[in-house]
Image (tube, coloured by chain):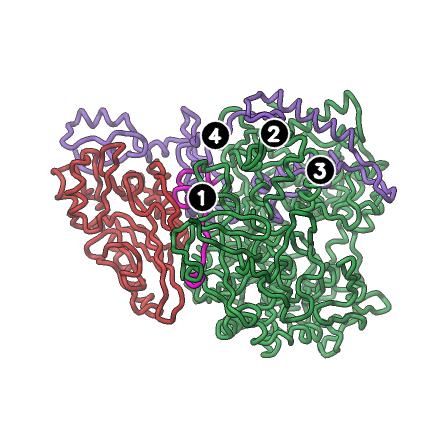
Chain colours: A purple, B green, C red
Amino acid sequence: MKRRDFLKLSCGVAAGAALSGLGIDLLAVEVHAAELTKAELVKKALQTTTVCCYCAVGCGLICSTDKKSGQIINIEGDPEHPINEGSLCAKGAGIYQTSAANDKRLTKVLYRAPYTDSWVEKDWDFAIDRIARKIKEERDKSFVYKNAKGQTVNRLESMAHLGSSNIDSEECWATAVYARSLGLVYIDHQARV
Amino acid sequence: MTNHWIDIQHSDCILIQGSNAAENHPISFKWVMKAKDKGATVIHVDPRFTRTSARSTFHAPLRSGTDIAFLAGMIKYILDNELYFKEYVVNYTNASCLVSEKFDFKDGLFSGYDAEKRAYDKSSWAYQTNEDGSIKKDPTLKDPYCVFQLLKKHYDRYNIDVVSSITGTTKGDLIKVYRAFAATGRPDKAGTIMYALGQCHHSVAVQNIRIMAIVQLLLGNMGICGGGINALRGEPNVQGSTDHALLYHYLPGYLPAPTASQATLDDYMKKVVYVTHEKKSTNWKSNQGKYAVSLLRSFYPEGVGREAGYGYDYIPKIDDGQDASVMQMIDSMYNGNIKILTCIGQNPCCSLPNTNKVRKAMQNLDFMVHINIFDNESASFWKGPGIDTSKQKTECFLLPAAASVEKEGSQANSGRWMQWKYAAAEAPGDALSSGEIIWRIMTKLKELYAKEGGALPEAIKFANTDFADKHNHFDAEKVAKYINGMFMQDTVINGVKYKKGDCVPGFALLQDDGSTCCGNWICSGSFTQDGENLMKRRSKNDPTGLGLYPEWSYAWPMNRRVIYNRASVDPDGKPYNPQRRLLEWKDGKWVGDVVDGGAAPLSHENGALPFIMNAHGLGCLYGPGLADGPLPEHYEPLESPFEKNIMSKQRINPAMTLYKGKMDKVANASREFPIVMTTYSCTEHWCTGGFTRWQPWLLEAQPGAYVEMSEELAKEKGIKNGERVRIKSARGSVEAVAMVTVRLRPFECGGKTVHQVGMTYNYGWRFPENGKDDSANLLSPTAGDANSQTPEYKAFMVNIEKLA
Amino acid sequence: MSNGKSILIDVSRCTGCRGCQVACKQWNNLPATETVQSGSYQNPPDMNGDTYKVVRFAEGRDEQGKPYWHFFSDMCRHCVDAPCYYSAEEGTVIHDEETGAVVFTDKVTLDYLDSVQGACPYSIPKGNERTGKVVKCTMCIDRQKEGKMPACVLSCPTGAMQYGDRDEILALAEKRVQELQKDYPKAHALNPEEVRVIYILTDDDEKYGNITY
């Protein structure tokens, strides 16, 4: 066996492929052939382009998603992207840790009742029903049709909305419709801060 | 950015001021270094020597909050030495316009100031007009009331000694910067300015940018390849979120938010449809009525007609002159007037100034909904330091959101490129995209209002929620089509047929008769008529060879890569710089970038001026629309080491945003707080660290809070590198590790030695859990700019003590 | 065959963004180590069992009294004639013919730490208590075999890191040193004939902090 063939198998530290010892025979090579290097896993994965989620340079990235598990296994710079040409800073290079691979990600609806000391898990139906109900109550109670001068203003001053410049444009626009249809005037996001 | 990232490579001189580009926009340095390879001078003007300074040709330190004085000196240098681009200044700027003889400037105040209201009556700043309403001009630039002469007079006061005394920059460094940058005032040279929040986080924020624009207009650097005023935006889609107006004072597409005095759509149209009397002005904003009606049609596409102003009647109106920006929002919350907050992907309990006040204000909420991918100090504010949860009343939700890589949609980068991204995986557990969450809440509200009625139910019942795909999930591309605009009925325009539901292939086709909808006119054109999404494009064709890549994604407006690009050609349409032909009039048409406005070159009969978004078509050396004066003037930050402003009796910006509550303490020129503090971010963290502190690789690289200080100050205070210290301001205190460094040095200014320190605002109590770190914004003041209300994070006063 | 591969690290172009440091961790799925802020940007303080690449930060004042801040993206040099190769039992360290990468197999257990580390002129190999192995940069040989450049090189924004055939990289290094000498008379390459990861410095070696040269 040529040394480079061996290396192809043995250097997949990352993919969890055990590094083989030296002096292996052909049989061992065959055994290890089932354990792919990370490079090979990435090659077989589904490739998706995305844009960095930090500053607004707008660097392109390629996400590799394992077709079986549906999990992202690698995120690196997109060499075709004309701005970053594959390069990334520390934050961009680490975007993998914003994915499901990070066990600190929020995965459940959390609810904190007044005067209690912890979050409790809830489902979406509970959350959406409760949120819509609370907003409606406040809006119906405090809606301002006219200001002190008697001018029509149709607004809700007792509710505010913040964010966000780290969601997609379509989400921002939908949020703009949401905030304006409720009558909010206290609307802001990260543009000033 | 007026230009775009790749364009930086074409610059002959790059001035980085109020930005730490190498650290906070690291990939920008790919293009900065390319320019440097070609011989460009890279200048970094900043209080600290940073990773940006390390790769710049030279670094000129200045005391935080003195950028206007610094650049005022440059304007004087350019004018005194006649280094401005005269033809450009005369033809393309308002230099020749005559200003009212009532205009005056005395001892720090412009004419029209009302001390009680802390506001200006701007009428005396207006232009002199001819009988036909057009502006009076003197192309010789000699009239004492022409803008050019007023500019000269105003900045003549900023001689090198005065500037050095204010800024603390040595005279040698000042001259070095001025000489290098002013050398770009030639047709064949380009200078660019890269700035970021270092310019915006001041009580003179907008004037900081204005003075950069003045420099660039004098040097003929606007609208050209390798030039421009380039705001390096700090969030992935802060361009998009601003374009789509998650702001109180705009509607999407920078249409002003309706005010109480504009009761009807007709009133509003009068306000937004600009009128000009200048023959050569395109006055693009004369089209805004079409954009406004089309916007309303996208908000209310069904069931609302002309009689309700296409939904104008349902849109909230702010009071005329009302400030509802974030500091005001917090103040109102602090005073118990705001009961509900919905918050997506933001961490106000660390990111907003005077964080103790913010954290207090949050406790007054009855109900809070927070949407994010990780927990943060705001979502969990109710269990923050010093809070007894058993007495804390707020009902809270923390909703799990999909991360950027888990959802499809577009982001607009600083260069205005709207880039499409795809979902690479499902979000973990129950997490959903923010768009889906908002859509579900809206849908539920619609259901409730349809069933039960309530306050102004039409506003909700008819609001657009047509955002879902056939599987009943938020469909970003469907929303993107509303943003782009669609025909609401079969229409024929200039002989071309458009069917109901077709995408509007550009904002020139938008109508004010209700026949088109468009959620944001500046984005119109991002789809073709038959629905091809141009934001997805990935072709690297580059016909100009200048790296414009017109077939890569889509740049608003109309795929223009450099805005105001008509200013890159002479009045006959010939490029000022034949080496960088951004645009050229050839054989009766424009070639190169997408021209700004379609008109012929200026010298032609139907030719037009380059600055098409201004009613007069000219670049503004003089800006009569701002709240705090038509010409930038140096004022001290709200908190500074000085009792007096060297320039005038007016110590602070006379129109700046101030708060006077119990928690809005201020300590100027105080012995208790003698050290200038500035705040910032670093490469390895992002904003308050709300995402990055939860990521082990980044936390490993920057594990905890630090305060950077000079060796001189450390010696004075008996502090050694790596020791823990406490930093205090009039408003709060925070701990950090001392980073004693040669990269900060005391300034000699105003006749004394001024120490300056700096901290990142990347930390908070929530995580890492074992740390003692918290937000640097516990220190910063609730005060801000007169025009934009950006808080003064970048210059305030503190003291430091070593912890036992 | 073009004499294997090489990496050029031109520190005059480095912005210290640490894209390379994190890209290395990302590609190799290396966990973070616990660090503390001790008054420096440099973290982790050195390479370790879970860190193959570290950017070193060193600052001071130049002859004119102006500050400098040097960044040195430290990693295994992949020596042309690697002492570590001979320091462990035969075959536990592999010197790849095609690329010239020096790669530790998992046979390099902690038993070899002293000899392998002692043999390395740069003290690069580190022990990992968790896995019981001695580890270091693999020059991303798995990527190279798939025709990709090493993760750190791909991530570099400014061209401070370049990857290619060794002959080309050597020529590039020579050219770059000449160019730099106009502005930086002290510009020099660090023993390019002996290593595959060739550094170009613009200042005295000792001003780059705790590097071995």
* Disc 1 chain ID: A
Q: Earlier in the sequence, mark 4 or mark 2?
A: 4
Is residue B587 visible to us here? Answer: yes
Span highlighted in magenta in the image: B692-713
Identify the residue under disc 2: B436
Judged left or right of residue C112, residue B196 is right
- In the image, what residue type sits under mark 1? Gly
As displayed, is residue B699 above or below residue B605?
above
Q: Of callouts 3 and 2, which one flags the residue occurring earlier in the amino acid sequence?
A: 3
Disc 1 + disc 4, Cβ < 8 Å: no
Q: CA distance from mark 3 to mark 1?
A: 40 Å
Give the residue drawn at x 38%, y 58%: C13
Residue B535 shown left or right of residue B522 in the figure: left
Question: Would residue B706 be counted in the magenta stretch?
Answer: yes
Q: Identity of the amino acid at label 4?
A: Ala
Amino acid at dot 2: Glu
* Residue named by callout 4: B425
Viewer-side residue, C130 vs C4: C130
Cα separation, mark 1 vs mark 4, equals 18 Å
Calculate the distance from the C-alpha at mark 4 to the C-alpha at mark 2.
16 Å
